[in-house]
Image (cartoon, coloured by chain):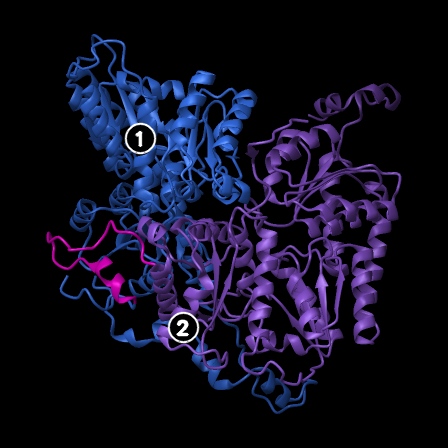
Chain colours: A purple, B blue
Amino acid sequence: MTKRNYATVNPCVMCQPMGSALAFKGIENTMVLYHGSQGCSTYMRLQLAHHFREPVDIASSSLSEKGAVYGGRENLKKGLRNVINRYNPKVIGVATTCLAETIGDDVPAIIREFKEEEGIGDDPEKYIIIIPVSTPSYGESHVSGYIKALDAVVRKFAEKPGEESAVKVQNEKLNVIPVESLSPADVRELKEIFEIMAEDYIFLPDISETFDAPLREYLPKIASGGTPLSEIADMPNSQASLGLGIVSKNLAVKYLEESHDVPGYSVPIPIGLSNTDSFFTELVKILGCPIPEKYLKERGRLLDAMVDVHKYLYGVKAAVYGDPDLVFSLTTFMLELGMNPVLIATGSKSRDFGTRMRQIIEKINPELEPVVLDGIDFDTLNDAVRECSPEILIGNSNGRYIAKACDIPLVRVGLPIHDRVGAQRILTVGYRGALELLDRITNAILEATDTFTAPVQPELAAYTGKGSGSECVEESQ
Amino acid sequence: MKEKIGIVDTLEERKPYIARKQEKGQGIPLTCDNNSLAGAISQRACVYSGARVVLNPVTDAVHLVHGPIGCAGYTWDIRGAKSSGVETNRTSFSTDMKELDIVFGGEKKLSKAIDELVGLYHPPVIFVYSTCIVGIIGDDLESVCKTASQKHNISVIPVKSEGFKGNKSDGYKAACDALKKLIKKPPENPTAKKVPRPSETIKPKINILGDFNVAGDVWLVKPLFEQMGIEVIVSMTGDSTAKAISRAAEADLNLVQCSGSMTYLAKWMQKEYGIPYLNASFFGIEDISLALRRTADYFGSEKMKKQAEKILETEINRIMPEISRVRERVKGKKAAIYMGGPAKALTLIKGFAELGMEVVIIGTQTGKKEDYEQISYSVRDGTVIVDDANPLELAELLVKQKADLMVAGVKERFIAYKLGIAFCDFNHDRVVEFEGFDGFVNFAREVDASISSPVWNAVRQRTLIPEAVESDKKSGRIEKAAVKERISGENYANKCKSILLKPEFLHQKSETAVESQV
């Protein structure tokens, strides 16, 4: 394997501000502003527009040389003023970039100053809410940017100045907060489950419509949908929080537990059989209701399908890569299917990733000895793929170069997916998501191995009395 | 010009950047060439992006981004520029600067990264791009690159593209400055002024500047010149190599297509090596013809002129039936153009005219005063001209100017789609050639495909409200009341019949704004 210590070749992560946009964009009537140079917003808009195939408006404080030297205060204020003027949002998420962080702008202080100047009060009912989050691009990755932004949002709404000792009015709700961006289709599926099972729930962030907007008669400036603000404000009063994802730390769930006594539970992202089982089991425990018949039927269909395809998948060597929790859940599913995930990798640096992966392998198939890597770039993945020789790749579309070079299929899951349509509709969660994934993986393998149309192997031709495959074709012509 | 206010609803500070062509032949005072307004959501990127898009098509170069991971990640294989040989440029290289590098400086990491990459890829040249952060912490790229260059005996060229130090145009300049360092003095008569040489004796040589070989454009253009007996030394930077670029000063003439990015380099080559330049475009029948004829005229060879005419006759005859067929289908349709650079915008005006279409909106990210003057002479009265537009302005303009098709890049694509307007990508994302004769056929067909698609008819009917059956008979099992309840509100149903679009921003104050004046 190539040992590169200094250069990163074909990155497998995006930067922190990108993650913050994925989070903020799932909140009702919210705009995002990057405090930095103009390019950051444009590049990330481009990435997101490519992936979701939606217009994505992200503002920038457009820092110039002057701003970089004398501080970005004026630019940030001007940017906020213009965004409010043009979009009239209820919330603006202000994410910093490397430039803003390095010149040392005190963003919360500038926002306080701005609010004072503009006469913007603290009452979220009456005034716009501005939420700063520190997301320099040189720190961690888009995954941490996402988690930090959600944490900042929950904190902002939970803090009630002047009434710190107010008595908490408990509601009957369940908070649901993922640690990684799920697809709009995933969010829709989960919401449906909660709608059926939970009396009331709060899903943060809800990108099911904001990043997959229906084309209807009315075109708003800010895509409709997103988690309602009143609901976010109600999160500290909920019965419990359910975090989706167990590799990365769910800061928002932790905060609600520690500061507002909302008990927090975390389950893996419900992809595959056992992860979806744990998800439902946890829900049953928290909510005290049985699993609806609908989902038991879906589970049955999944089992049926798993039986149907078990021979095609048994022992098939796979490489999985992407964000840590997505990879964890995908790998679990592959293990359940009898596949052999020879290479498991994430671009994020994460010590827990390896530990979690080893635990799950130990649990389901201790015979396997996969290569587990974190903090990789695609060049490292490429080297590892050549060493582990998987028969299929599972991950985002940036693995296409490797898949092509190795002539193996790529099943696209995660973000970004730029070279195929439907990224926003890829369903992986729940029993239905598992079914869809199962079909896609199996069909990709059937297609690649040419199982039903491949010619007879030449060395076996003598036994078939038909000659070799190529001759067959010639004869039929 | 008389009504500069009220074309669209926008920020006060943005108003001088939007104008309407009013009287024929009259220029338009349009503000342009400034840094983008904070919070206005410009479609522009940064200095680094400008430099990167110009240099990225150099196929055998290692393009190393010195900065945090994002800058390299978002520009990985972004250009759509094809290569006929190696494709090192499609790999993304970064120093992935982390917090410690910011604190202690990134020079050491950069120099080690260069060593590593030279060992692995053996490139003839490494472009080292600086990003915002480098400009702040003050890494000395110049000296790191110089040392590395001497150590490895290859060109290691710093590209001064700190994101915040200007706008995209400054990035073009930084890219040209980098290219300058690759261009070597030609072996003979380096300072003697070039004069047109008869092609009968020595084969004339040209460079094509500002063609990036997106989808393979250059491959449809180069053969035209070769047929005229001209050697194309290099196209900058589409499908170019370090070696080919180093020979650029041997040329007798430079043809500049993307003037926004390459005029600076062309002027430098004129000054430094006495190579004159002509502006040219290889898009659309008129502009291709002009490019071939002007080149032949420049060299003054009768044989070449004849050859050019022969090519034009054959090629135009070959593609005309298809162009005419499409023209019949799309003529009279209204087009909106929003481009990065002005050269492409200008040539598109002619291209649309050849298809019988009319331009109703035209804008660029980086146009300069002279460019907009030229644009305003080229468009009809009533056309709206806009500099550094943003999504809300574009959306409103598309609706008010009643555009049938937009030509732009990815970020604009979904604005058009959401409004139910056809779209054609003339940017990095397109997968077919648009230049040359076959390229124009491709363009015409794509315009037709997008405009003529039946999906727009479906989209125009944006909602589905079947009329409830007015019957008292109990034939159905569902109570009439329940049906009524499901269709929420009858008035709504009437209201929504034959709706085109209701963007939120059109309901605001500027309802009085001017309709398109055709």
Please report, as a chain letter, where disc 1 is located.
B
Q: Residue at x 16, y 23 (%)?
A: B297
Amino acid, disc 1: Asp
Q: SS for tag 2?
A: helix
Q: Quadrant of residue A250?
A: bottom right
Task: Point out residue B475 in the picture as x, y percentages from the top left corner.
Answer: 67, 86
At label 2, the amino acid type is Lys
- Disc 1 vs disc 2: which is toward the camera? 2
Instruction: Decide: is A263 above or below A46.
Output: below
Q: Main structural element of the magenta stretch: helix, strand or loop? A: loop
- Quote the CA–CA distance across marks 1 and 2: 44 Å
Residue A128 part of the magenta-drawn span: no
Circle 1/circle 2 CB separation < 8 Å: no
B32 within the magenta span: yes
Residue range in magenta is: B10-39
Report crowding for label 1: few under 14, some 14 to 19, many 20 or more residues within 10 A (C-alpha): some
| Disc on res. B177 | 1
Q: Where is residue B108? Give x, y as percent.
A: 50, 31
Camera-nearest residue between B468 and B2: B2
Rendered view: A295 above or below B180: below
Residue at image mark 2: A115
Q: Which mark is residue B349?
A: none
**Residue at the (70%, 55%) spot, across then down:** A428
The secondary structure type at the circle numbered 1 is helix
- Quadrant that contains the C terminus of chain A: top right
Q: Is residue A32 visible?
A: no
Residue at 39% over, 32% down: B55
Residue B89 visible here = yes
Q: Where is residue B496, by image quadrant?
A: bottom left
Q: Residues within 10 Å of mark 2 (few under 14, many from 20)?
A: some
Return the residue found at the far bottom.
B472
